[in-house]
Structures are given as C-alpha cells and as structure tokens.
Image (cartoon, helix red, strand yellow):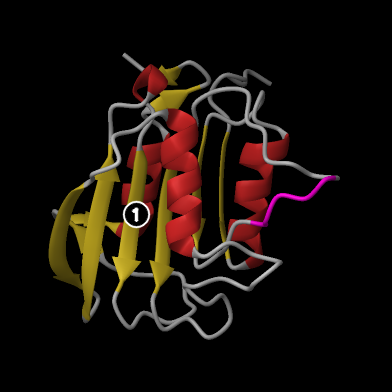
Amino acid sequence: YRIDTTRVYATGYSNGGGMSYALACQLSDKIAAVAPVSGLMPIDGAAYPCSPTHPTSVLIINGTADFVRPYEGYDGYLLGVDDAVSFWVGHNGNTSTPETTTFSGGGKTIERSIYTGGSGSAEVRLYKVINGDHIWYSFEDDGVAHNQMVWNFLSRFDLEGLRE
C-alpha cells in the first residue's frame, strides 16, 4: 500500500478520544496530529509518561456538561480539558492567549479557541461546547460540517508540522 507515513492521524470518541491522546504521547514518532472528541487525556504516569517527540497539532472537542468524561476530568486519572490544552500549548510553544470566537451550532453555544505560533506551526484548537453532553457532535464552523472540519484540520499537518 502507498501510505504516507508522515501523515498518520488519530481521532476518536470517548475512550477513542483518550486513545488518540495516548497515541500522540506514546507513538508521537508516527502520529502527525490528533482530534479527540468527548474524550480526556490520561494523566502522565511513571510507566507511561507523555513525551511527544515533536510538536503535535491537536483539535479538542468537549462539552461542559459531559457526564461520562467531565470537562474537569477525573482527579488522579484523566486530565481536565483545560489542563490538556495547557499541556499541548506548552509542549508546542504556542501563544498562551488564544484567538477566541463564540458561535452557535447544533443548538449549542460553542467557544472556539485557537492557539498558534508553535514550533513547526503546530496548532491547538479547542471547541468548548457549552452545556454539551457526551456525544459525537454535529455542528458547523463557518459552514463546514463537523466531520469535514476534523479532516480539514488534521490533513494540514505532517510529522514536520504544517504542510506547505
């Protein structure tokens, strides 16, 4: 098969979202970018520290009223969403102040925060769905449907960063 091994991505819902974070941490030499949805990032442990080998672009989509994967995380087990954002922003060297826009989609208010300026033009993008539940979302951002939006984000990057 003709696979571009510099452009391997991971996305997933719930535990699959957590898995995409784990892949970015544990197999970062093979993963260009990730997009977890309604999932949380595992807390570093001695056995499995999160030590990505390159700047990694991350698109995160979580609801603030998720009862299965709470936005605040699970103490000692899974990071809260804001802590996961802080980790990736720090790892990538992104600007700490995002460009934030609020819009309506899928019957919800959504805050989109974009952190840029990272090494290799890595980007962290958070879609915070106010009162959003534990679902795979269906909303549009600037007329682009959620699933296409995820692909549009991921496909912009390879292991070196932003593709030109």
Instruction: Classify the position of the C terminus by image quarter.
Output: top left
Residue visible at 63% across and 30% down in the picture: 52
> Quadrant of the image for the N terminus?
top right
Residue 9 is left or right of residue 49, and the answer is left
Q: Does residue 57 appear in this view? A: no
Residue sitting at 31 percent across and 71 percent down? 129
Q: Main secondary structure of the magenta part?
A: loop
Q: Position of residue 102 (x, y in %)?
A: 14, 64
**Identity of the residue drawn at 63% across and 73% down:** 74
Looking at the picture, does residue 82 appear above or below residue 105? above
Rendered location of residue 85, percent (x, y): 43, 50
Using the rendered image of the protein, determine whether residue 108 is visible from the camera's viewpoint.
yes
Which residues are the magenta region? 42-46
Disc tally is 1
Identify residue for label 1: 126
Residue 62 picture quarter: bottom left
Specify whether residue 92 is painted magenta. Answer: no
Tell whether position 44 is magenta.
yes
Q: Amino acid at mark 1?
A: Leu
Question: For residue 163, which quarter of the picture?
Answer: top left
- For residue 62, side relative to residue 34 (left or right): left
Residue 15, image quadrant: bottom right
Q: Residue furthest right?
A: 47
Q: Is residue 153 rendered to the left or right of residue 136?
A: left
